[in-house]
Amino acid sequence: MSKSSKNDAYQQHSLLNRAEEAYNMLKKHLDQDHVVRIISHNDADGISAAGVICNAIAREKGKFHVTIVPRLKSEVLDKIAHEKYEIFFFCDMGSAWTQRIGQLKGDAIIADHHQTIDSTDQQDSVVHLNPHLFGLDGTRDVSGSGVTYLVARLMNHFELAGLAIVGAFGDMQGNGQITGVNQTILQEGIKKGVLELKEGLKISFINEEPLFKALSYTYLPPLPGISGDFDGSRSFLEKIGLSSEIKFPDLNNEEKDLLKEALMKINPEIFGKNYMITSQKPPLKNIDDYSQIIDACGKNKKYGVGLSICLGDEDESLKEGMELLKKYHEVIIKGIGWIKREGSREMDHIQYIYTEDKDIKSFMGTLANIGLDIGLLNPEKPVLALSRMDPLIKVSGRTTLKITEKGVNLGKALEQASNSYGGAGGGHTVAAGAVVPRNNQDNFLNLVDDIVKSQLGS
Ligand SMILES: [Mn+2]
């Protein structure tokens, strides 16, 4: 065992001890029949996290009241401060607000994984559960639903390990390697028989959709010429002699091998591990698909639908979730077609795409990502995806790890450039956002171009 993994094991142990404190606090209130006030985030991870703790409480015959919010802002906390609950449970958020949460009338548990500093003045009424407090990585190694699950597993609800990983996939911790605390959760889930790994093609909704659609809906791993492109997908299938309307389960073994071989020539990562929830039926069996459905609910602001699916409503809510996903897929296909036709406008060191289309506007960041992944956009230059939102321009910046390794930090570039022209922005090195007044769009783009140039030079 290497030194770092030994440390990691020790740190995970400390995190689990903190989870036990959270469990003890929660249990105390459940025993007194108190309603648990849950506040969670509106993305796939946050909704899954709420799903984990709501399921656990329901299975303990406890009561809860849950609200899903886009961001934990001061106003949200002002409102909560007037509520008379004995116990609050914050999922996938809260670490930035420990002080304010400590002033709530009741006890509080914060189960978050966002970067935070250790607040040594811990209040007795708050249990703060966050991997960063123990030197663990919360960006890659565990999500909000995973942290929340660390409490649920102490109630012996190991079957919720699936939802814990659904949230991790939602936060992009699922592609490639499952590491750290996520790996611990996964391994325990496998041992308990609630999760299983299956080698196979990693095609989205492989059992539900006709093959050409399933292939076009697959973005991770990216399939250049096929992802987001119905025509490309059809002609690929035609070329290898398969009917595009057929569903994968209806192929014979020979045809399945043929498909696998042809796809692996495009991207070998298309064959690998699928993460399955043993007790679930498709489309919720494959964790990647499950996460996409919850993500679509979140992106369409139908948080209740997403949460109901997590709580086991496999009729109405799942049907609605699948509709939302279909709508989402259609917009992405439309957006990819648009990028394919128009391309980006290249400057010296960056490139940008610009839209006024109201369907596409909300998904510009996703489109920039996919565009880079499938090679529609030049991977050598960061992409700024601009949406017109009068009187502002909304900017989503995306680039590749390769470019950030050369010194590019989009978060800093967008922060500095937007501040210079009466806007605001920031974010991570590979992904960032900003808003700027529309009349300063060109100045802003030129300044980002200059900043990226200097970042590359230093
Ligand atoms: Mn999260």
Image (cartoon, rainbow, N blue to C red):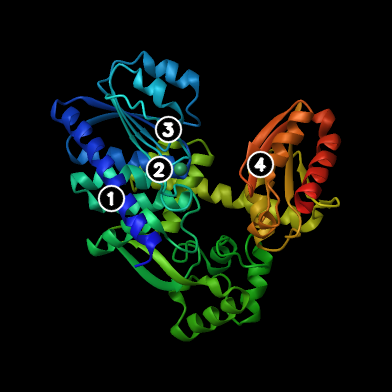
Q: Residue furthest left?
A: 31
Q: Earlier in the sequence, mark 1 or mark 3?
A: 1
User: Which residue is found at the position 79% from the left and 50% from the top?
Assistant: 350
Residue at numbered disc 3: 95
The percent coordinates of residue 278 (x first, y second) are 29, 62
Which residue is most to the bottom? 254
Q: CA distance from mark 4 to mark 3?
A: 21 Å
Residue sitting at 53 percent across and 39 percent down? 300
4 or 3: tag closer to the N-terminus: 3
Secondary structure beneath dot 3 equals helix
Q: Position of residue 293 (x, y in %)?
A: 46, 49
Q: State which mark lies toward you, 2 or 3.
A: 3
Residue 425 is left or right of residue 85, and the answer is right
Would the CB of label 2 be found within 8 Å of ligand 1? yes
Per the image, the residue denoted by label 4 is: 411
Kind of residue indicated by mark 3? Ser
The quadrant holding residue 445 is: top right
Q: Which residue is mark 1?
A: 13
Q: Which residue is mark 2?
A: 144
Amino acid type of disc 2? Gly
Marks 1 and 2 close (CB-CB < 8 Å): no
Which tag is nearer the camera, tag 4 or tag 1? 1
Where is residue 260? Give x, y as percent: 52, 79
| N-term-proximal mark, 2 vs 3 | 3
In space, the residues marked 2 and 4 are separated at their CA atoms by 23 Å
Identify the mark at residue 360; answer none if there is no mark. Answer: none
Whole-number angstrom distance, CA of label 1 to CA of label 3: 20 Å
